[in-house]
């Protein structure tokens, strides 16, 4: 059953751009076909523009954002390496788990959920870490963590940044911020269905590649010979052709609109939500000054039930929002406004529906 009329305003996938939906239906050709390789090269160049980087190893990993996270650790961490990880939500915690499985000596820097991590705490957590890792836009809390101060003072450490919910929605400046490794997902602000994880790796990080990482599938030593190999491309795995069509189309939409214009559209929609929700009795939860425009977290007005409220939104109005995770499950809603979904008419549609629900709950 296709639920094409649903408005996805949760922390997960956003509604895809129409151009992306059309691209998914294009005829499939081989992953070593010269036409496909040319499309892959163009997709990677578009990703460099969106990432704001010149990194040669910039491409979409053939799996979702969690695979990007794993690739970012297993290819650069050796057993016993001290790795500082900022944790102020679910995905910082997941970074710790993945780094530990790669054999890292993980130094957690915890912050209260809903608040941003002080970059100085990360910089002072270890005298000489192999890596500092942080989530730029924490999907579980709607909080933006500062990255630029880490790049300015990281020393010899590699700086790894999770940009799953930030790429395409707010400024991400890989080269200006001195980020060594970053990964994202297609299903958030890029307006493409889930299934790929854009990653970018700087030259300094390339010097630290593990010769034989734990994962064969995510081994960047081999993948790069297909992605940026000169002459004949080395076969590693079969690329997901249709998903790459979709990403190519989604990036074209973003760059045709203009990257700064896309950021601005997300900002305007976020501001409209941040203004309209408190007028209905919702309270903005994330720390002021660090609230994401593309993912707004709120506590609920008295009388509105978490589960029932989200169920009524979905069944009556065709609008899907997300509930809280971990310690704030049942207490917080996570309202996404990303990619093609980031339109003021969608914001108005949601606010009108919430006004009716809150009036009924009083």
Image (cartoon, rainbow, N blue to C red):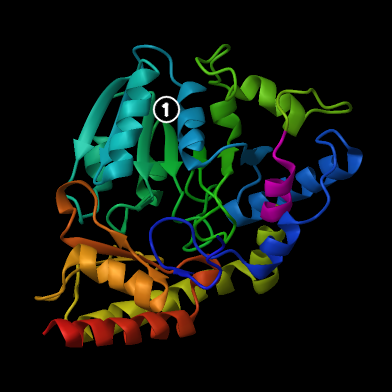
Query: For residue 302, what is the image quadrant?
Result: bottom left
Q: Which residue is depicted at the point 72% across and 55% down?
A: 24
Mark 1 highlights which residue? 156
Picture layout, residue 39 above or below residue 220: below
Picture layout, residue 205 above or below residue 292: above
Picture layout, residue 277 above or below residue 103: below
Q: Residue furthest front?
A: 1
Which quadrant would the N terminus be assigned to in this image?
bottom right
Q: Which residue is depicted at the point 39% across and 28% down?
A: 131
Give percent across and percent down for residue 127: 26, 25
Please name whichever residue, 52 or 105, is drawn nearer the observer in this view of the structure. 105
Please name whichever residue, 127 or 312, is drawn nearer the observer in this view of the structure. 312
Residue 221 left/right relative to 152: right
Residue 277 left/right relative to 203: left
Q: Magenta stretch?
A: 239-247
Q: Which residue is depicted at the point 42% across and 78% down?
A: 269
Picture layout, residue 291 above or below residue 29: below
Give percent across and percent down for residue 152: 40, 44
Give percent across and percent down for residue 234: 79, 23
Query: For residue 241, what is the image quadrant?
Result: top right
Residue 282 left/right relative to 177: left
206 is within the stretch colored magenta: no
Main structural element of the magenta stretch: helix, strand or loop? helix
Give percent across and percent down for residue 310: 28, 67
Q: Which residue is depicted at the point 43% across and 42% down?
A: 161
Q: How many marks?
A: 1
């Amino acid at each position: 059953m296709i639920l094409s009329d649903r408005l996805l305003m949760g922390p997960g996938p956003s509604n895809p751009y129409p151009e992306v939906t059309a691209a998914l239906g294009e005829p499939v050709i081989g992953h070593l076909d010269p036409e496909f390789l040319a499309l892959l090269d163009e997709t990677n160049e578009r990703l460099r523009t969106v990432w704001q980087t010149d990194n040669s190893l910039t491409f979409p990993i053939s799996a979702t954002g969690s695979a990007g996270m794993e690739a970012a650790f297993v290819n650069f961490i050796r057993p016993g390496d001290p790795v500082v990880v900022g944790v102020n939500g679910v995905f910082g915690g997941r970074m710790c788990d993945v780094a530990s499985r790669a054999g890292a000596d993980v130094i957690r820097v915890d912050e209260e959920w809903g608040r941003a991590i002080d970059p100085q705490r990360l910089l002072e957590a270890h005298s000489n870490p192999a890596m500092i890792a942080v989530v730029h836009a924490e999907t579980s809390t709607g909080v933006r963590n500062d990255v630029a101060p880490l790049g300015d003072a990281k020393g010899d450490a590699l700086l790894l940044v999770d940009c799953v919910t930030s790429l395409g929605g707010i400024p991400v400046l890989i080269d200006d911020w001195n980020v060594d490794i970053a990964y994202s997902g297609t299903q958030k602000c890029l307006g493409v269905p889930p299934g790929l994880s854009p990653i970018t790796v700087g030259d300094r990080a390339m010097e630290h590649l593990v010769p034989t990482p734990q994962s064969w599938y995510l081994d960047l030593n081999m993948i790069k010979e297909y992605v940026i190999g000169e002459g004949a491309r080395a076969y590693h795995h079969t690329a997901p052709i249709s998903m790459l069509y979709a990403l190519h189309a989604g990036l074209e939409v973003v760059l045709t609109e203009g990257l700064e214009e896309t950021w601005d559209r997300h900002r305007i929609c976020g501001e409209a939500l941040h203004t309209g929700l408190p007028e209905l009795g919702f309270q903005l939860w994330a720390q002021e000054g660090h609230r994401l425009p593309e993912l707004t977290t709120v506590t609920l007005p008295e009388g509105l039930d978490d589960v029932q409220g989200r169920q009524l939104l979905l069944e009556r109005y065709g609008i899907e929002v997300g509930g809280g995770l971990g310690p704030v499950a049942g207490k917080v809603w996570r309202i996404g406004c990303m990619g093609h979904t980031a339109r003021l008419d969608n914001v108005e549609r949601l606010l009108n529906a919430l006004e009716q629900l809150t009036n009924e709950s009083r």
